[in-house]
Structures are given as structure tokens and as C-alpha cells.
């Protein structure tokens, strides 16, 4: 196999891995309602959720420490998620939020390193940057849930729905994309400040970073 053929094969593999990660993250956003149906629903969701960032980390970095952290935090998310789903308690909920934040942080670090150390902005970098955007939204949901845990009543729902992490995941993406339906409202100081930060970060990310990466990708030599 020539070096050119090997390089093309390697690039195709990276695109495939980046695409698989993005698809898994999108699937995670569609599967999270399983946690509310009981039975095997939470088990299916947490098995999937506790695996996707481990896969993502291992496919974007060869650093052993980062890979090990992804496995440890993934296991922590799975165990705490199972406990909180089948034997709910404030302590188990706290464990879910903290482990989820750590789990996301590992994935964010791996993606940031992968994106910003690339010599060229190829297709897989654009896909990874899109994944990073979605991961940030999911991570903010865990942060919002932790705020609600520490300061109950930090968020209110116009429908009267219970403020749980599932609702805050929806709220996080509505905030990140600045859609702002207004059905969930932050009323605590910490809740409001983090919501404002996420909205600003979401706008700047798409306007500056993603636009810049797309421009570099389009202008690269053929």
C-alpha cells in the first residue's frame, strides 16, 4: 500500500470515527426520555450514555491518562445513574450530576485538543467541532441540575413540571441555541448567570469558531 493510499485510508477512518461519535451524541439526546419510563429504560440509556464519551475519548486521543479518566468517569456515571434510577435519593442525584460533569469534562478536553492541534481543518475536524458544541450543551445541563440541587427553586416551569435533569437538558439546549421558548425560567442568581454564560458561549461558538473552521476547510488546497 502506497503512502498516499494509507493516508487516505487513515483520513476515511478518522471521518468515520468522528461521524460515529456525532451520531451517538445525537442518539443520546433522543434516548434520554428512557430514564423516565422505568423498567429497563434507565439501564439501556445509562449503558449507552456511559459508553459514548469513552468511545469518543479513545477515538480522539492516544493519551493513556485521558483514556483512563474517561473509563473511570464513565463507570461512575453508570453506577450513580443506576442507583438514582432504581433507588432515587438526593445523594445519588448529586453523584449523577458530579460524575456527569467530570465525564463531560474529559470528553471536552479530548475534543479541544483534537480540534486545535490539527494541522489542517479537514472534514473530521468540522464534525468533531460540531460534537463539541453538543457536548457543551449536555454538560451545562448537569451544571444546571447541580445548581438546582444546591439551591432548590432556582428554576421554574410555566407548566408546573418537575424541575429534574431531564427537563434541564432540554432547557440547556434551548439556551445554548438561544431559542428561548420561555417555558423554563432561571430565577436564582447562579441559575441566571450560568444561563447567560451558556447563551453567550453558544452564540460565540457558532459565529466565531465554527464559522472560522468552515472557512479554513473551504480554503484549504485541494
Image: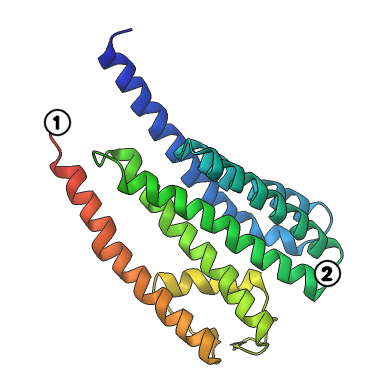
Depth check: 71 or 78 in front? 71
18 or 74: nearer the viewer: 74
Numbered tag placed on residue 222 in the rendering: 1
Q: Secondary structure at mark 2?
A: loop
Extreme residue toward the front, this view: 65
Q: Please, what secondary structure does the residue beneath circle 1 have?
A: loop
Picture quadrant of residue 41:
bottom right
Compared with residue 89, is residue 33 higher up or lower down, i.e. above or below? above
Relative to 88, say whether 40 is above or below. above
- Image point 59% across, 55% down: which residue? 103
User: Outermost residue, right direction?
Assistant: 87
Q: Contact, CB < 8 Å: mark 1 with mark 2?
A: no
- Give whichever of 131, 147 is nearer the camera: 147
Q: Position of residue 126 (x, y in %)?
A: 32, 46
Q: Residue at the spot x=34%, y=47% of the render?
A: 115
What mark, if any, has residue 88 been given in the picture? 2
Spot occupied by residue 139 in the image (x, y as percentages of width and height): 53, 64
Counting other residues with Cα less than 10 Å from the Cα at mark 2, is it few (<14), some (14-19), or many (20 or more)? few
Apparent side of residue 70 relative to residue 88 in the rendered image (left or right): left
Q: Quadrant of the C terminus?
A: top left
Q: Is residue 64 above or below residue 107?
A: above
Q: Is residue 6 found left or right of 155 in the rendered image?
A: left
Question: Residue 85 location in percent, x, y?
Answer: 80, 63
Mark 1, residues whose alpha carbon is within 10 Å: few (<14), some, or many (≥20)? few
Say whether disc 1 or disc 2 marks the residue closer to the N-terminus: 2
Real-space Cα separation, disc 1 to disc 2, in angstroms: 55 Å
The answer to whether one can see residue 154 in this image is yes
- Which quarter of the rendered picture does the N terminus lie within? top left
Q: Residue 74: horizontal and vertical position, in percent? A: 66, 50
Q: Residue at x 30, y 39 (%)?
A: 123
Amino acid at each position: 500500500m502506497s503512502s498516499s493510499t494509507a493516508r487516505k485510508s487513515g483520513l476515511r477512518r478518522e471521518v468515520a470515527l468522528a461521524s460515529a461519535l456525532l451520531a451517538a451524541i445525537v442518539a443520546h439526546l433522543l434516548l434520554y426520555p428512557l430514564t423516565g419510563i422505568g423498567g429497563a429504560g434507565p439501564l439501556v440509556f445509562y449503558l449507552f450514555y456511559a459508553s459514548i464519551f469513552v468511545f469518543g475519548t479513545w477515538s480522539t486521543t492516544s493519551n493513556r491518562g485521558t483514556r483512563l479518566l474517561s473509563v473511570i468517569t464513565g463507570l461512575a456515571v453508570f453506577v450513580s445513574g443506576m442507583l438514582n434510577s432504581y433507588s432515587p435519593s438526593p445523594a445519588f442525584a448529586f453523584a449523577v450530576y458530579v460524575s456527569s460533569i467530570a465525564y463531560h469534562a474529559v470528553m471536552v478536553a479530548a475534543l479541544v485538543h483534537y480540534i486545535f492541534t490539527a494541522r489542517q481543518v479537514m472534514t473530521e475536524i468540522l464534525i468533531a467541532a460540531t460534537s463539541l458544541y453538543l457536548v457543551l450543551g449536555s454538560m451545562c445541563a448537569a451544571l444546571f441540575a447541580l445548581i438546582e440541587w444546591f439551591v432548590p427553586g432556582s428554576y421554574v416551569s410555566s407548566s408546573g413540571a418537575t424541575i429534574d435533569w431531564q427537563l434541564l437538558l432540554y432547557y440547556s439546549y434551548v439556551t445554548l441555541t438561544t431559542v428561548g421558548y420561555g417555558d423554563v425560567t432561571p430565577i436564582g442568581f447562579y441559575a441566571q448567570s450560568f444561563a447567560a454564560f451558556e447563551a453567550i458561549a453558544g452564540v460565540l461558538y457558532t459565529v466565531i469558531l465554527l464559522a472560522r473552521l468552515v472557512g479554513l476547510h473551504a480554503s484549504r488546497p485541494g
